[in-house]
Each structure stands twice: as structure tokens, then as C-alpha cells.
Image: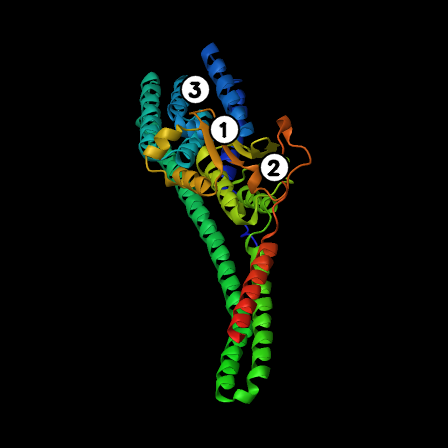
Amino acid sequence: MADPQPVEAPRDFAAAVGKVVVTARMLFVYPVLLSWTERTPTVGEIVLVVVLAGLSLTALLRWRWMARFIRSHPIVLSLEILAAVSVMIPAGIDSPYLLYLSTSALLIGILTRGLGRTLLVVTLLLGYAISSLITTSLVTVTVPEEFLIRTGTSLGGLVLLSVLVYLGSTIDKLQDRVDRAVELATQNTREAALGEERSRVARELHDSTVKSLVGIRLLAKSSTMDSSRTESAVQLIADSAQMAIDDSRRILADLRTEEVPPLWPSIRRVGEELTALHGLPVSIEGDTTAEPTCRIRYGVRKVLEEALTNAALHSGAERVTVQAALAAEGLQIEVVDDGTGFDPGDAERGGHYGLAGMRERAAALDCLLRIDSAPDAGTTVRLTVPLALLETTSAEVPFGGAGPAPLPAPALEDDVHDERVENGAADVGTRAGT
């Protein structure tokens, strides 16, 4: 069975929009500078504009880090909003600073959720309303029409900011739906591939092994009805049994090569899928020549796949590295990310079954699993596969350790087992004949 083709993942739409918004925010500094040709800015206003422009440039260059930081500390965005509102008071509510606040409204909708979004929206709208009242009170209104125009401008600004927050939240919801749809499509693709393999095995069994067994049953039945055909029937039964054994070996060999592929190409494929789905670069470094035995290879892959998936979904990391090294105690595989990190003890006590499942699977494989992490310090998942559970080892093991000889392939074990069974059957037949 050919490997299922990974589902083509869309771009991270919300991140792309966020970068465009930040770029627009930097461009909006230009009309602010032009407005200074008509009035003299204060020193405080100049400093705030420089700081806000620097923050925008940082967000553009380090978007993933900045987005993660704002989600964890929304108060930073509220301070930025208050700074923009404070410089808007001397410049006026119809100044270019309104454009800057508009980009802040979009970022609130894209980057924040729940209570944090509510507090930021209140800060934004209340700050703009207060700046409008102060600006209006500082200007002497000579005609009623001018007062109506200023009031309409203030209300229009409030409506504009509210609509932009809603637009940003819609983009965030759309990104969630796209992510869920891609995840579901990937899962369906894998399940369809598994169903295809099951159908293939059923077809192979029906067309070969089952037919051979039916033939054996019919031959055995006919030999009991006609004693003159016993000798020829026994030979035919032996031939049919051997054919069934050969067919079963062929089917099992196909399962071994296709259902338990080599570890490192599988991990590379998982990394490519995570990069396509989440935009997270995954690199593989170190000694990738050592392979776990066929018996535990699937379990090792699932542990590493869970660690990579957790890094992509929950850590907010900008890069994940898979490092492999052959040491005296075995093959050490580390999954290292530069994300937010967490307290492993609190995570497991909080009902995070993924970590508990990784530990249980590693224990069932007779492997060692260690998870090192702390808040804001990244995460390292280290899986140690003992030398006895490796099919291939390096010529020299570091630190003076001596690796065991390569284990025999499972197919050879099956051959020995089958030979013993056949020899046993022959012995039984000889004793029966005597």
C-alpha cells in the first residue's frame, strides 16, 4: 500500500493578515510625520511614536513570538492603546493616529479571546471616547454645525473601531475552522489508507490462504471416504498446507514493510506535515542510522509524533529540533522546542492524558522517557531506546559501551518457528505410523 498523500494545508491565514496589519501600522507612521509639518509635536509625542514604530517592527520580524507574548500578556496591548490615545489628544481625533488605533482593533480581534479581548475592547473604546471629549472641550465651537460634525466624527470612530474588532475576531474564528477542517481531512485520509490496507489483507486472505484451507478440508474429507486415495491425499494436503504457509508469510511480510516503515523517514514525514499545517519548522539532526526493532518501532514513532504534535499545537514555538545520538545506554532521541514551556507535574495533574499516554507507552516499550520543561523555558522530551532494542548500532558506541549484536529479523524467527512446527508435526506423524 502506498503511503497516503498528506492533505494540502492552507497558509496560516490569521498570521498572514496579522503581518499585513502590522505592516500597515508601520506605514501609518508616514502620515503622522506629515502632520508634524503643520504643527509642532511635543517631545513626549515624538518618543511615543518612535517606541510604537519599534514595537511594530519587532512584531513584523518576530510575529510568532510577539503573538504568543500578547496572548499571554494582553496588558501590553492595552498600554500601547493608552499611549496612542494620549498622543491623539493634542493631535485631534481625526488625526492619523486613528489609523494606528484601527490596526490595534484588528489585532485585538485576531490575537486575543475571552476576558482579555473584552477588557482590551473596553480600554480601546473608552480611551477613544475620552480623548474625543477632551479634544472637543479644548476647541471653541462657534457654530452648531461644527459641534455636530465633531460629535459625528467621534461616533463614527467608535463604530469603526468596533467593526474592526469584530472583523479581527471573525478572522480568528475562520482560522480555527480551517485548522479543524484540515485536521479532520488528514485524519480521514489516514483512516481511508488503513481501510484500504485492511481490504487488501482481506482480499489476499480470501484469494490465497482461505482457498488453500478449504482445499485441505475437502482433501481430508475425501481421504476418509476412499481409503485407496489416502496416500495421494496426504501429499496434496502437505502441498496445500505449504502453499498456505507461503501465502501467509508473504502477507505478513507486506504488513511489516508497509505498516511499520523505518523510523526516521516516518518522523521526517510527520515533520513535513506539521510544517505544512502549522508553519512550524522541524529539523532532524544527529545519528539517524540506528533503528528500533520492528516490535517497538511503531510505539517509538507514536511517542515522538505526540511530542512533535504537542509542540506544534500548544507550545507556540518557532522551531522544533529532533536530535538523535547513540550513547552507552542506547539511542537517545530528543524533541526540543523553544516554546512557552510548562510545569509537567501540573500538566499531568490537570488531566493532560497525552503526557501520561507517552509515559505509559514508553514503559510498555521498555524505553525511558524524560520530560524537561518550565514556564517560558521551552520543552525537551528525551526518549532512550536501549541498545538491546535496536536493529542496527554504530561500529563504536560512545563512552566505551559495547553494543549488542544486531537482532535477527522477525522473518527469520518465523522461519525457525515454522521449521520447529513442521518437524514436530513430522515426529507426530512418525509416532502415529508406528
Q: Nearer the viewer, mark 2 or mark 1?
A: 2
Task: Determine whether 181 is above or below 226 in the image.
Answer: above
Q: Quadrant of residue 68?
A: top left
Q: Earlier in the sequence, mark 2 or mark 3?
A: 3
Residue 260, how many percent across, how many down? 55, 52
Q: Nearer the viewer, mark 1 or mark 3?
A: 1
SS state under label 1: helix
Q: Is residue 133 visible?
A: yes
Check disc 1 and give the amino acid type: Trp
Task: Determine whether 240 is above or below 285 in the image.
Answer: below
Residue under pointer 2: 284
User: Closest to the observer: 338 or 29?
Assistant: 338
Task: Determine whether 189 is above or below 135 in the image.
Answer: below
Task: Please tell me how crowded label 2 is: few (under 14), some (14-19), or many (20+) other residues with Cα within 10 Å.
Answer: some
Residue under pointer 3: 91
What residue is rendered at 58% in x and 82% in y?
231
Residue under pointer 1: 65
Q: Nearer the viewer, mark 2 or mark 3?
A: 2
Question: Quick check: 137 left or right of 35?
Answer: left
SS state under label 2: strand
Q: Earlier in the sequence, mark 1 or mark 3?
A: 1
User: Closest to the observer: 67 or 18?
Assistant: 67
Check disc 2 and give the amino acid type: Ile
Q: Earlier in the sequence, mark 2 or mark 1?
A: 1
Residue 402, how many percent across, how many down? 63, 33
SS state under label 3: helix
What residue is rendered at 42% in x and 38% in y?
359
Q: Quadrant of residue 228?
A: bottom right
Residue 419, how many percent across, how many down? 59, 62
User: Closest to the observer: 425 or 134?
Assistant: 425
Q: CA distance from mark 2 to mark 1?
A: 22 Å
